[in-house]
Image (cartoon, grey):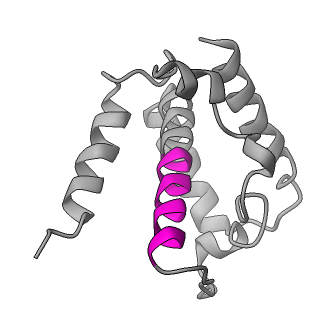
Amino acid sequence: MTPQERQLVADLFDRLARLEDVTRDPDAERTIIDGLRRAPNAVYALVQTVLIQDEALRQADARIRELEGSGAAGGSGSFLDSMRGGAFSGRPESGAARCPPCAAAGTRPRFISASSPVRAAVRSWARRRRPRPA
């Protein structure tokens, strides 16, 4: 793990710590706890997934702003809405959740390696969502 990756993980858990007092959906919480019983090491892959998706969302947001401008979406009152507008909304402050030395060096963080199954899944998903040129 690089120092930048360590900082990304620390920043993620700082954001999560701000959500400790958020009201939780009891059914969702039970389902998540059951999942962790079946896959007790899932947190590792979940952290990787969150960091990769956060990176992908920042890149997509930058591209959307470049093409169309800025806009906001509203919530629907569901399980995930408690996160919308909370610790995971908005833009990172001056690159706080980024890995500038990695980007500048043209490398990827080792914790989230290019061969990571999480990265492969996100790339596959992004390719399917990418509009085809006319």
Is residue 112 depicted above or below 126 in this figure? Answer: above
Residue 120 picture location, percent across and down: 28, 36
Q: Residue at x 46, y 19 (%)?
A: 107
Main secondary structure type of the part rendered in magenta: helix
Q: Looking at this view, is 72 or 18 the one in front?
A: 72
Q: Quadrant of the N terminus?
A: top right
Q: Nearer the viewer, residue 35 or 51?
A: 51
Q: Tell me where residue 119 sits by quadrant.
A: top left
Q: Position of residue 64 (x, y in %)?
A: 47, 70
- Residue 31, compared with residue 9, is above or below; it is below
Which image quadrant: the C terminus? bottom left
Q: Residue at x 25, y 63 (%)?
A: 130
Magenta-colored stretch includes residue 69: no
Q: Is residue 1 above or below residue 128?
A: above
Q: Bounds of the magenta span?
A: 53-67
Image check: 67 left or right of 51? Answer: left
* Residue drawn at the location 21% of the way across and 70% of the way down: 131
Q: Position of residue 11 (x, y in %)?
A: 77, 36
- Depth check: give the residue in front, 38 or 87: 87
Describe residue 102's horizontal placement relative to residue 6 as left or right: left
The answer to which image quadrant residue 98 occupies is: top right
Q: Residue at x 62, y 12 (%)?
A: 2
